[in-house]
Amino acid sequence: MEQPSFEVTPEKEKKWNDLSKILSLSKKETSENYRLVTTPVFQKKIKESLLTGKLDQKQKDEIENLEISLKLEKNTCSIIKTSAYRECLEEIMENQKILKSEDLLKLNEIRIFLSLKWENVQSIHDITSEPIFKKSVLEAMGATGIIPSNYWEGLEKLRKRLLLTEQKAKEIFYQCVKEKLKIIFEKAVTDNKKRNTPQNSESKDSGDDPSVKQGAGTALGIEAGDSSGNQLFNLIDLYFRNKIFIENEQVFPENKMSVLKGLSGRSEILISSRSKLDFSYPVTLRGQFEEKTITEMYRQYLVDCFSAKLQSEKRRLFNNLDKLGPILGLSPIQINSIHSGVGVVIYQKYLSQALSKGFLDQSDNAFLSNIQATLSMDSGKCSEIVREGKRSVVNFRVEQIFASPNVNPDRVSEMRKLAIQFGIDLKEDLGVSQEQRSKMFRVEIDSGIEKGKITNESQELIQEIQTSFGLDDSVSKKILLDCITTRCEGHLVNAIASLRRKVDKEVINEMEKMLSFGNLLPIKIQSSIGSNSEKTQLLDLFQSYSSELNTSGKFKEKLELLKLMLDL
């Protein structure tokens, strides 16, 4: 039977042009219809040639001649040929997943026969072999996600056998890594939720500080967890042990001027360079989880860094801190924001404990400096936190003083000295009312006079206390006069009561206290308590104890002061 002729002659071409005009077809429609008719013819010829198995030059020439005679576009022919090549590849791999040496030879023969370049069929191999290579990579990773060193060579051999490009193999590997990272991160989120879930525990003493968690390494009162099982560290470990990161070395030129020895005023410029090694992270979890979840997990890891109980564990976590953020897909701005937030919390918690003893020692300052340096915190912000911490401590002391119905003079004195040491102004920084400042001034002055701390010889202490409480001279003088008057009258009442009970020792004791106040500011006690006769008896009794009361050699001065105060 005579084979049909597919040669496009001028007569045939004229006929279909005339037909196109009759049917009112555009040039584009005519070309498309022609392609639909001729393409199956060309496809059939290629399949028949491949089925014969005789991929000789004669068959190749026939295909090329048919291509020319049908006047097919180069792009159309290329698509048909690559499609035929793909069908051959799929047929070979249908029964076996990995290509044998003879299969590779056969495929290469088909490619040459079809006049295809390697770049024409590379994408076909990449797509077809991707599931096989991905499965092998995941199997090599195992449960830990870390590929043993002796497995890498096997994977490279597999890549070559599957005819995968290095770029495609890397993309598949990155996909596998991302899947493993997601699994580890999901487990870390689950573990974090479990440890933050309130557990039933024995009731504790209401006096315990709920903000300080027992057993935390630094007792910072932050959410310290069991960092030894931290899944986020496993995530970093997987990333670096698989060598996923990309090293980027930056070289910076440096010029250093050096004075030439023996040549006054002469120098030379030494040109050198220094390098800095940075890492880029081709696989991250950005977009795989909610941003809120990722930032919270990074924050918790940062907290674990500071709350780890063992120094070795603390170092291990800190050493990997700069790697975790980029792997999670956090930007430098996000990382700095988290660092600042956690740094403030740690600063405040640590200060509230360290400042409670009244000062910051060398170890305290070293720890705070470490926080500032590690988290790249602003020095001005840190200074403000320290300042605010000191204000809080002093303010808490003030609240404690007035929480009791009776103001304790020792507490007042301790608080005032602490405020001076911390540089805190009770009026300007804490806004303590004048009424409260006046009360504390009076209580401390009263106690100081009674205990002999404030005398004629040490009146400068009054000025110091007055300045600390921010009181005007007029206010402090009024308080001082009222304090001395009230205390002197009280001691006089007690002395007369003891006189009536004939308890001489108590009488002398009360008059000694009265004189300690009168010695600071001599006053005549204007009181109707006691008659002139009783006051005279008090004076006589005081004189009778002259030998016991003259230990300081100032008995006469005391006697004169007593007469003045008793108005005798």
Image (cartoon, rainbow, N blue to C red):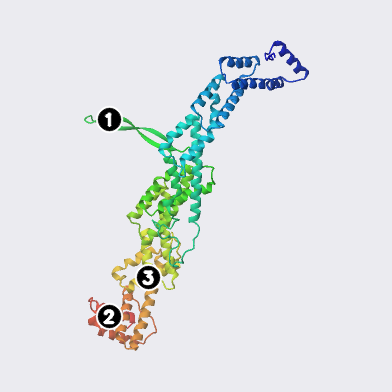
Q: Which mark is residue 409?
A: 3
Q: Please, which residue is most extreme toward the front here?
A: 1
Tell me which numbered mark, 1 or 2, is placed earlier along the sequence.
1
Quarter-wise, where is residue 348 in the image?
Answer: bottom left
Q: CA distance from mark 1 to mark 2?
A: 87 Å
Picture layout, residue 13 above or below residue 151:
above
The answer to whether marks 2 and 3 mark residues whose Cβ atoms lie closer than 8 Å is: no
Q: Which mark is residue 559?
A: 2
Q: Is residue 266 left or right of residue 179?
A: left
Report the amino acid beneath label 2. Answer: Leu
Q: CA distance from mark 2 to mark 3?
A: 30 Å
Q: Please, which residue is most extreme toward the left here?
A: 262
Report the amino acid beneath label 1. Answer: Ser
Tell me which numbered mark, 2 or 3, is placed earlier along the sequence.
3
Q: Could you say whether the residue bearing mark 2 is in a helix, strand or loop?
A: helix
How many residues crowd around disc 3 within 10 Å: few (fewer than 14), some, or many (20 or more)?
some
How many residues crowd around disc 2 within 10 Å: few (fewer than 14), some, or many (20 or more)?
some
**Nearest to the observer: residue 110 or residue 332:** 110
Which residue in the structure is indicated by mark 1?
Answer: 267
Residue located at (43% from left, 71% from top)? 404
